[in-house]
Amino acid sequence: MENVFEFPLQRILAGDDFPLRGEWGKSFFGNSNPIVLELGCGRGEYTVGLARNHTDKNFIGIDIKGARMWTGATEARDGKLKNVAFVRTDIHNISTFFGNGEVSEIWLTFPDPQMKKQRKRLTSATFLDNYRKVLTDNGLVRLKTDSNFLFTYTSELLSANKIPVNEAITDVYSTTDSERHGLLASIRTYYESQWLQRGITIKYIEFRLPHAAVITEIDDSHIPHDEYRSYGRQRRSKLGI
């Protein structure tokens, strides 16, 4: 599909750059609009939903499993959405695909909280440092999660490192006062709908990543673990999200 890209692992390991690195706007999208990534995009529902709502931005969904993103890539193609693309790769490799400061925002939508494996947690200090390689200075990171553990951990990590938080919402669907919150509630993924049916609240936190910040890890042993397992989470974890 013309809106889906991948790169041989051998070339990534050799240190080669993806041909569109630093040139996504000019060479693929044909504009200079901001580029937004959704990491661990799954079926691509959120990537496509955001692209429909924000035609003034370019959106790229990233996931390790190509079969997952087929749904979103097909919907974007059939809907003639020119501001959507997908990349099949491990999230660790994003600097192979994007140049320094090429990305303005990153969305993390319902990642596995990895309660026992901090190094695999998508809001860990290690991952935040990796995101800064491609984000503009003070670029946005947006986390939407059903996990109270991940929300609490992320909040405490940001606070400990004095990273500015724009907004933190403990229940997206109980907050309907503004256009921003309405948009957050307007896009629902397959799993999100199931969690809501179970009475699980959806949390959201938005923060900026300064290039100059020194990000150190925190002790998370005091944070209570979630007492449930989300639909599909165990299976997705085994597949490498």
Image (tube, grey):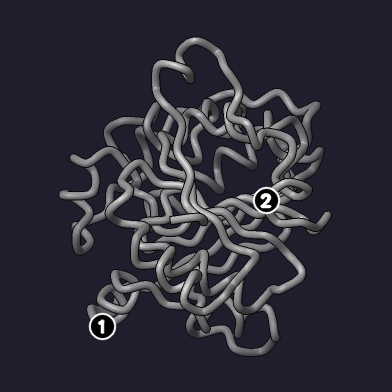
The residue identified by callout 1 is 197
Give the amino acid at mark 2: Phe
Q: Is residue 223 above or below residue 178?
A: above
Q: Quadrant of residue 175?
A: bottom right
Viewer-nearest residue: 111 or 31:
31
Q: Residues within 10 Å of mark 1 (few under 14, many from 20)?
A: few
Residue drawn at (46%, 31%) of the image? 7
List x then y, in percent, for residue 46.
Answer: 48, 67
Q: Is residue 125 above or below residue 144?
A: above
Residue drawn at (48%, 20%) of the image? 12
Q: Residues within 10 Å of mark 2 (few under 14, many from 20)?
A: some
List x then y, in percent, for residue 168.
Answer: 61, 63
Residue drawn at (42%, 37%) of the image? 89
What secondary structure is marked by label 2? helix
**Are discs 1 and 2 less than 8 Å apart at CB?**
no
Q: Quadrant of residue 204?
A: bottom right
Give the amino acid at mark 1: Gln
Query: Where the C terminus falls, by quadrant?
Result: top left
Viewer-nearest residue: 47 or 111:
47
The residue identified by callout 2 is 28
